[in-house]
Structures are given as structure tokens and as C-alpha cells.
Image: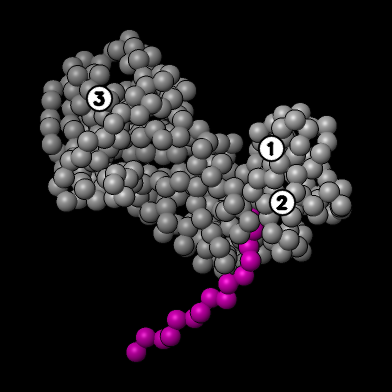
Amino acid sequence: MNAPRTRVQRRPVHGVLLLDKPLGLSSNNALQKCKWLLRAEKAGHTGTLDPLATGVLPLCFGAATKFSQLQLEADKTYHAVAALGVKTSTGDAEGEVIQTRPVAAITPQTLAEVARRFTGAIRQVPPMHSALKKDGKALYEYARAGEEVERPAREVMIHELKVAPARTDRSPYAIEFVAKVSKGTYIRTLGEDIGEALGCGAHLLSLRRMATGGFTEAQCLTLEALEAMDEAQRLAALLPVDALLEGHTAVTLDTDNAGRFLSGLRRRGSWPDNDFIAVYGAQPRALLGTAHARAGELIPGRLLAPTEIQQILETS
């Protein structure tokens, strides 16, 4: 007879965990494991990584979930390895082979020209195997049912792209590329499009997110490392909530103005126009939320609840 499962006593946890997502685990499964390890009441991630992808996955807990959208909007950097000469139904190694073609000699000049061609603003047709929705239904649901639906091309930005030959025992012909891209860029599609530009087709063999926003893989913890920690170490591994607000201008309000700001009231001052402001209370110093400034007014954005602020102060 199985022993009854121990019920986890949840608690308020506030901060950001930089996880190095392992291969084969969905972003949501990784989130739920970390949420259980931290006994956190509230958690969310900042954009999915496919199960076949690894790398930087910022996980937000408590008050940090209010600012997770900022990471969804952030530029991201990926390293990918693609097999040449073979196209699959999904654009990666999980799909069925749908086409094979011979691979012509690939020279450094050819790869440099392809990198140049795909750097800057480009247009992509989203893959059928994606979470993008059409008529309220995810594209992958249509794909699983064997349906192909029309998808309009979308403009994305490839800030940097480096392409080089790769050695792998999984394919006789392969390339690797490192791409810094805007939100909404599909790396599987980029790999397929590069394969088409080389005249042979391609699909991804591996994908790793190296950075998102200001967060890099060097800052990340593995799931195994987190599991090996005790509770105090896990909590100490969390970055503060305002780690998500890098690049925001800090504004500090006195006690009277901080209270009014937290109630949603605009404050008057000499602030220049600014879209990205992190607002703090002075005594004690604590993050209150975000704001933007227009014509000398500080206009509240996403605000922390007084209970969240108190909990953060008690545990900091």
C-alpha cells in the first residue's frame, strides 16, 4: 500500500530564480518542481522553452510575477545546432522526416553571406508546431490534427547572427549558429530558413538559450543543484524582485508620497519624461512598483501590495 503523500505547506516567496532548464522537461514542469522545492504560493515563468531546449529560464515567485512581462519582451540569445539536408515536420529532431536533399559544399564565404542575409529585420512565418493561436486555438493543436492553417508572416529582429560549420555524430552535415533576437523570433524557423538559403533544408538538433534580457547562463542554477540545497540556501539563491527592473530609473519617495503612490495616486515632481521607472519607498527602502513620468507627473504602473512589501522586508 502506498504511503499518503505529504502535503506541502505553502508560504509567500518573492523573488526570481534563474534556472538552467534541463533537456526533456517542459517549462511548466520545471516551474512546478521549483515551486514545490521552495514551497511557494505563487509562481510563473517568463516565456516557454521547448522540452528539447535547455538554458536560461527566469522563474518568478510572488510579487515578481507582476513584472514577468518585461522578460517576455526582452531580447534573447540562443545557440543552435542544425542538421543540413533533412527537413522534418516540426523543424526539429522530434518531427518526422518530410524531405531530404543533397548538401553542396559549404564555404566560410557562403556562411558569412547567409549570416548577413538573416541579420536585421526579417519576416518569419510562424511554425505550425507553436503555441501561437488562431481563432482561439493553438497552432500545434491544428498540427496534431493533421491540419495546416494559413499564418501571416511577422517581422522580427535578428540583432546578431554568427554561423559556422559544426561537428556532430547525429548528422554528416551540420552548422551551428548563435543568434541574438527580438521577442517572437522562432529559432526553429530561423534554422529552417537558413537551410533553405543554403539550398538543402535543415532542422534543429539542439537549442540552448544563452541569455534573456540581462540574465545569462553563468548566473543559472541547475535543478539538481537546487534539489541538493536546504531551504535556507534555496531562498538565498533567489534574486530580489527588482532584478527584473534592470534599466529602469530608480525614484525614491518619502513616506507620505509613497503611501499615496501605493494607493494609485499620481505624484507631482520634477521628473523628466520616462517610460521605465522603478519606484522605492525611503523608510525603510523597499520596492513599491513601476511607473512612468509625463509632464512632471509620476504615474503608477504595476504596484506591489502592502502585504507583499512587508513580507519582502521581513525576509530580506
Please tell me which of labels 1 and 2 falls first in the chain.
2
Q: Which residue is mark 1?
A: 292
Q: Name the spot of residue 216 as percent of width and height, x first.
A: 55, 38
The secondary structure type at the circle numbered 3 is helix
Report the mark closest to the observer, 2 or 3.
2
How far is mark 1 from mark 3, CA to CA? Answer: 44 Å
Residue visible at 42% across and 56% down in the picture? 28
At label 1, the amino acid type is His
Residue visible at 16% across and 51% down in the picture? 145
Alpha-carbon neighbours of circle 1 within 10 Å: few (<14), some, or many (≥20)? many
Q: Is residue 227 visible?
A: no
Alpha-carbon neighbours of circle 2 within 10 Å: few (<14), some, or many (≥20)? some
Q: Which residue is mark 2?
A: 264
At label 2, the amino acid type is Gly
Q: Which mark is residue 195?
A: 3
How far is mark 2 from mark 3, CA to CA? Answer: 52 Å
Q: Name the spot of residue 18 as percent of width and height, x first.
A: 55, 49
Residue visible at 66% across and 64% down in the picture? 232
Judge from the rendering whether residue 9 lies leftward or rightward of residue 81; answer left or right.
right
The secondary structure type at the circle numbered 1 is strand
Judge from the rendering whether residue 175 lies leftward or rightward of residue 6; answer left or right.
left
Using the image, determine if residue 280 lies above or below residue 99. Answer: below
Q: Quadrant of the N terminus?
A: bottom left
Q: Quadrant of residue 95?
A: top left
The secondary structure type at the circle numbered 2 is loop
Please tell me which of labels 2 and 3 falls first in the chain.
3
Report the mark closest to the observer, 1 or 2.
2
